[in-house]
Image (tube, grey):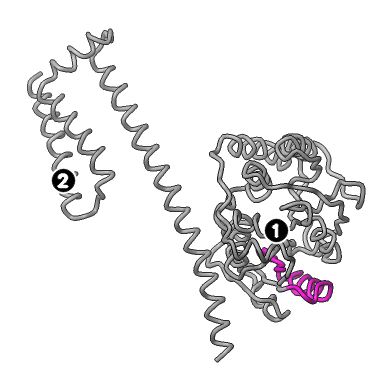
């Protein structure tokens, strides 16, 4: 199993998050994708003992995650877990996500599924509602936190994402789910608690939230219009290993 | 009147020569050259024989021939813009993939160095 931490200018928290993940998941490999940070995030991650993928310039979460997925696909990992580098995700919840991969190809750690105390208001809330409604329909399961960056992907999902991970704004969360659903992958959500971010505050101004709503609608619309991707052929050898459960 | 058309013809020929020169110096790849050469040819033909434009405008029911010209050039420029946007998107995708590949290669190189 590979834990991918996409990080852009997260020097303040990256070291701690890397340490937490290593402590909580001693058997897992961990890679930090330094998404063109200018504040020494890469050095901090390395000092904490993480493997490091350094992007030469900022690609956004989508680009960083695609790099992580390619790394996982080439390294033949059976699962990838994405954890945000700002420390809002508790690595102790990762086993719950992984357990869900038994019945799903993608497991999303969701904030609003009865645990935790994160509350959004105004346009941001409407945007989240809209995204939830549309994506729940597309995936055929109830999704309440579609923009969560806390998710696990199995081998099939990794193979798809390594090739076609959406790189645009919100593409990494919204379009990725739609794309996965249309490719026939199973998506499920797992309730998790989110913590207060170690550093920085989420943007909550109403102008920004409205802009977010607009971009969410755009991302959703574009994702719906786009042609569907088919799942890459899985080599026979990989299929066997994936089913007999010899985890790496 | 004829002087004006002479100037138009000169301008048209100049633009075609410019396109050809850019092509010759490999500053313009073939996929862009086609559309520009086509446009250049249309400009030259129309500058040489303005009556053609009048005939076409009459055929499609546009009272002022110049309006057909404006419409035509607007549409042509729109298409060129669209092509450029599509190409920019493709280039961005390629740059992105290269950046990802660079990150992966750098990691691999470090891993190999550490092993030595």
Please report the bounds of the magenta region as a residue range: A1-28
Q: Secondary structure at mark 1?
A: strand
Q: Quadrant of the C terminus of chain B?
A: bottom right
- Tell me the quarter of the picture where residue A209 sits: top right
In front: label 1 or label 2: 1
Total numbered circles: 2
Residue at left offset 87%, top offset 49%: A118
Q: In the rendered structure, does residue B53 fall within the stretch colored magenta?
A: no
- Whether residue B41 is visible, yes or no, is yes
- Compared with A27, A216 (above or below) is above
Residue occupying the far bottom of the picture: B116
Disc 2: which residue = B20
Res A121 → quadrant: top right
- Residue A33 horizontal/vertical position (percent): 63, 67
Q: Residue at x 92, y 51 (%)?
A: A115
Q: How far across and how far down the image is residue B18, in percent? A: 17, 44
Chain to which the residue tagged by mark 1 belongs: A
* A95 vs B99, nearest the viewer: A95
Chain letter for the residue marked with disc 2 in the picture = B
Q: CA distance from mark 1 to mark 2?
A: 54 Å
- The residue at 54%/77% (across/down) is B108
| Residue A14 painted magenta | yes
């Amino acid at each position: 199993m590979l834990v991918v931490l996409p990080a852009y200018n997260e020097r303040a928290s990256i070291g701690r998050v890397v340490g937490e993940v290593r402590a909580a998941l001693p058997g897992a490999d961990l890679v930090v994708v330094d998404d063109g940070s200018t504040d020494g995030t890469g050095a901090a991650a390395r000092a904490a003992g993480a493997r490091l993928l350094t992007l030469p310039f900022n690609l956004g979460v989508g680009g960083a995650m695609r790099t992580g997925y390619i790394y996982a696909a080439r390294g033949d990992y059976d699962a990838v877990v994405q954890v945000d580098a700002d420390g809002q995700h508790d690595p102790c919840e990762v086993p719950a996500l992984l357990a869900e991969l038994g019945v799903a190809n993608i497991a999303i750690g969701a904030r609003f599924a009865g645990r935790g105390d994160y509350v959004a208001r105004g346009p941001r809330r409407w945007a989240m509602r809209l995204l939830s409604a549309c994506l729940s329909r597309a995936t055929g399961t109830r999704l309440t936190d579609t923009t969560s960056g806390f998710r696990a992907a199995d081998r099939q999902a990794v193979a798809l994402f390594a090739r076609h991970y959406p790189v645009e704004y919100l593409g990494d969360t919204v379009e990725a789910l739609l794309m996965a659903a249309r490719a026939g992958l199973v998506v499920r959500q797992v309730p998790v608690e989110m913590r207060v971010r170690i550093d920085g505050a989420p943007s909550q101004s109403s102008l920004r939230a409205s802009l977010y709503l607009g971009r969410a609608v755009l991302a959703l619309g574009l994702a719906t219009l786009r042609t569907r991707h088919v799942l890459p052929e899985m080599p026979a050898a990989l299929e066997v290993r994936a089913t007999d459960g010899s985890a790496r | 009147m004829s002087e004006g058309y002479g100037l138009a013809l000169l301008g048209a020929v100049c633009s075609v020569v410019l396109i050809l020169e850019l092509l010759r110096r490999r500053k313009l790849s073939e996929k862009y050259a086609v559309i520009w050469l086509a446009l250049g040819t249309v400009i030259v033909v129309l500058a040489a024989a303005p009556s053609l434009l009048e005939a076409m405008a009459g055929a499609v029911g546009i009272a002022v021939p110049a309006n057909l010209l404006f419409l035509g050039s607007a549409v042509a420029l729109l298409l060129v813009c669209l092509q450029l946007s599509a190409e920019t998107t493709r280039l961005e995708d390629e740059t992105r993939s290269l950046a990802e590949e660079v990150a992966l290669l750098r990691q691999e190189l470090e891993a190999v160095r550490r092993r030595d």
